Image: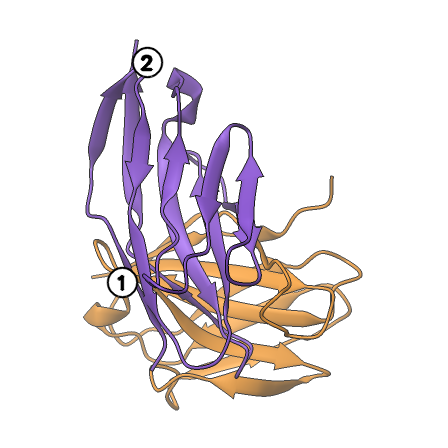
Chain colours: A purple, B orange
Amino acid sequence: GDSVTQMEGPVTLSEEAFLTINCTYTATGYPSLFWYVQYPGEGLQLLLKATKADDKGSNKGFEATYRKETTSFHLEKGSVQVSDSAVYFCALGSNTGNQFYFGTGTSLTVIP
Amino acid sequence: EPEVTQTPSHQVTQMGQEVILRCVPISNHLYFYWYRQILGQKVEFLVSFYNNEISEKSEIFDDQFSVERPDGSNFTLKIRSTKLEDSAMYFCASTHFSGSSYNEQFFGPGTRLTVL
């Protein structure tokens, strides 16, 4: 069945460091891929998405490219800020049903 | 900006008790969902709801669970007789369009359920 495997955390980085959070997926058909972010005390917010192979989603300096050949959707940011501290979830939207499949979430802490 | 809201933020209950978790989806949305996340594990799909009926459910969503849209705004998840393993964060989500994979689901902040 469809599933998402996400890099384990927690991740601690210094401000302005480069961030990569790995995400790989297993799916039948042609899923869409999403990154959600959860700030403390808040709900899951969409960070970016890509709906087909080779699409690049980007938002707030974050990027992820839908790579069908490696079944990956890694999240990257060139220079993290303290305000990026949050939990990041990779998710797959299956085109064979309504539900989303999530990874376990990766907690990121950015220190000044 | 419209958002999904959930109440309560934290619910503590005794094993065997019934709990009702409440959600107010975004007002013009048509599809509603419940997910849960047991501590340290993945966010798991429980159920989707459209046009006043369940459209899809996971094997987690057994007879102890039920969902309801009692009025035009609320969407509830009821657990009839809670078990210790029901302790988790429960997220409600909604989306406007068809349940296509292409469309963003909007999530609430979650209700943390603790079963003692």
Q: Which mark is residue A54?
A: none
Q: Residues within 10 Å of mark 1 (few under 14, many from 20)?
A: many
Image point 35% across, 87% down: which residue? B59
Q: Count all numbered tags in the image, as a single digit.
A: 2
Of residues B87 and A13, the one nearer the viewer is A13
Q: Position of residue A84 (x, y in %)?
A: 41, 26
Label 2: chain letter: A
Q: Residue at x 53, y 47 (%)?
A: A56
Q: Residue furthest bottom?
A: B63
Residue B11 appears at what percent x and percent y? Answer: 38, 54
Q: Nearer the viewer, mark 2 or mark 1?
A: 2
The three-letter code of the residue at mark 1 reads Ser
Disc number placed over residue A15 in the picture, else none: 2
Q: Chain of mark 1?
A: B
| Residue at disc 2, secondary structure | loop
Residue B48 lies in quadrant: bottom right
- Which residue is rendered at x = 71% and y = 74% of the image? B98
Instruction: Measure the C-alpha gap from mark 2 to mark 1.
Output: 35 Å
Q: Residues within 10 Å of mark 2 (few under 14, many from 20)?
A: some
Residue B87 badge: 1
* Amino acid at circle 2: Glu
Quadrant position of the C terminus of chain A in the picture: top left
Do pointers 2 and 1 mark residues of a single chain? Answer: no
Which of the pair B79/A37 is nearer the observer?
Answer: A37
